[in-house]
Image (cartoon, grey):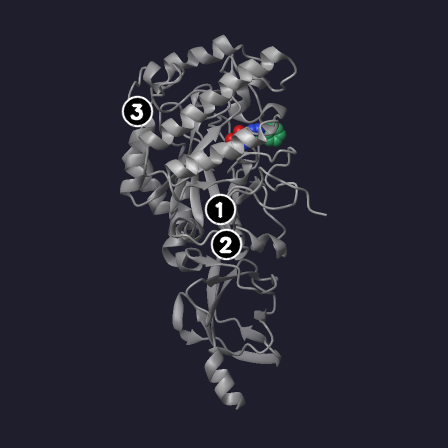
Amino acid sequence: IKKEVKYGQLTELPRQDEAMKKWRSNRFGQFIHWGLYAIPGGIWEGKTYKYAAEFLKSSAGISTATWDSLQYQFNPVKFDAKEWAKMAKDMGVKYVTITTKHHEGFCLWPSKYTDFDIENTPYRKDLLGEFIKAYNEEGIDVSLYYSVLDWHHPDWRYKLNTEEDKAAFERLKAFTENQLLELLERYPTVKGLWFDGTWDQCWKDNGKFSYDLEKKLKEKNPGLIVNSRMRADEYGSRHFDSNGVLMGDYESGYERRLPNPWDVAVTKNDWECCMTIPENQWGYHKDWTLTHIKTSNELIEMLVQCTSQNGNFLLNFGPRGEGNFREKEVKLAKEIGDWMDDNSSVIYNCGYAGLKKQSWGYFTKSSDSDDAINMVVFNKPINGKYRVKLNKGSIIKRAYLLSKPKKSFNLEEIANGEYFLDDVKGKCKDPFVIIIELEDKDSKKFKQK
Ligand SMILES: C[C@@H]1N[C@@H](c2cn(-c3ccccc3)nn2)[C@H](O)[C@@H]1O
């Protein structure tokens, strides 16, 4: 039976306004985690801490006073916003999400509501403003990550047990609302807000406040896109309200993990997977020998899988404290960009093809065409023949490599809508695309008559 939920879903989904259609067609985004944690980079007093570098304060048991003094060392002399935006453009991302304030509470913009911000660093300037301008100039949409959880703010409380807790958290709520409205006021081209640090009881007890806040933010910036992680309904249910209805505008529960590739249910909603290049480092860590570092082919496969299931892929980069990227990240961005140069047509404005996952790789389909299906191959079949199972009644007109459109595959129909394609491709080391052109519906109807 349905519960009466007053503070659950705010906006009827799926949204079909232009802003959301653009978000959907973007598919590939860059995540940037940048803050004071990038200065120590996971190492404190000569000791390396394996846990996520943006958690060094807690994993190394550092006092707030000591941690906050890092603010006076934050001077990214190598930061070049235009260079960052160019690298992102060449990688093929259509949007970027940057941490304006992570759990440490340090703000990358000059905020009226705190001194723990970029203005009180040797850098002084509006770093976030420079970043947004440079990325927008490259035609990249900007979304802002904001952590409600704030280790620095004296009024943060994990739980509201006493009257004093409640009074303090009322101040924290006002601070949060003020900062968010300030961000939308200062940076009107921003397309979205990516909320994090919203799992504690203090925030979950404030379902009505956060519901009203989402409304206020969307009134301030019409078209604003908000993730499902922003809030809980009045019963404390997060991402989905107590009736299982998605909150925010897209599901943002896939953090460092993807859905099962054969999961069809996930295609019903908009969703985004955010992913790290190491196993679990969002902020810059000096030592990348601690865990597996994903290769560009692994990351490309994740991007293609997300697209194949109607999801976006947000790939994280953690710049150094001085404002440049580690060479391995620059190299991966280049490798992914080279692949996107030839294959982005199977990503941008593409999504679920309505077909079952098959062993050689993933299907994607452009939202603009019903007569072509993309096969993105990651696993070449031993026998060189690609088994392709389409919907019943589908007839393949032609199949060819995106890279060699003139040379058609031989087709062998083995059942209704099921074919073998012969392999025309020699050695290949990168994922590649086969285009399936279908007989369009009318001509088929005509034949049947
Ligand atoms: C998007 C990612 N979310 C932040 C995070 C992850 N976690 C976390 C904490 C405990 C268990 C699992 C995950 N807490 N904060 C990470 O720091 C990064 O910002």
Disc number at residue 367? none
Identify the residue under disc 2.
Answer: 307
Mark 1–mark 2 contact, CB under 8 Å? yes
In the image, taking residue 231 as reference, residue 192 lies left or right, namely left
User: What residue is drawn where x is 52% and y is 54%?
Assistant: 310
| Quadrant location, ligand no. 1 | top right
In the displayed structure image, the side of residue 245 where residue 376 appears, left or right: left
Hey, which quadrant is residue 58 in on the image? Answer: top right
Q: Residue at x 40, y 38 (%)?
A: 219
Instruction: Tell me if 352 is positioned left or right of 336 in this view.
Output: right
The amino acid beneath tag 2 is: Thr
Which kind of residue does numbered mark 3 sit on? Asp
Q: Which of the marked residues, 1 or 2, is nearer the chain's N terminus?
A: 2
Q: Choose between 200 and 137: the one closer to the eye.
A: 200
Q: Is residue 30 above or below residue 338?
A: above
Give percent across and percent down for residue 354. 56, 64
Q: Total of numbered circles in the picture?
A: 3
Inter-mark Cα distance, 1 to 3: 28 Å
The label shown at residue 313 is 1
Mark closest to the chain's N terminus, 1 or 3: 3
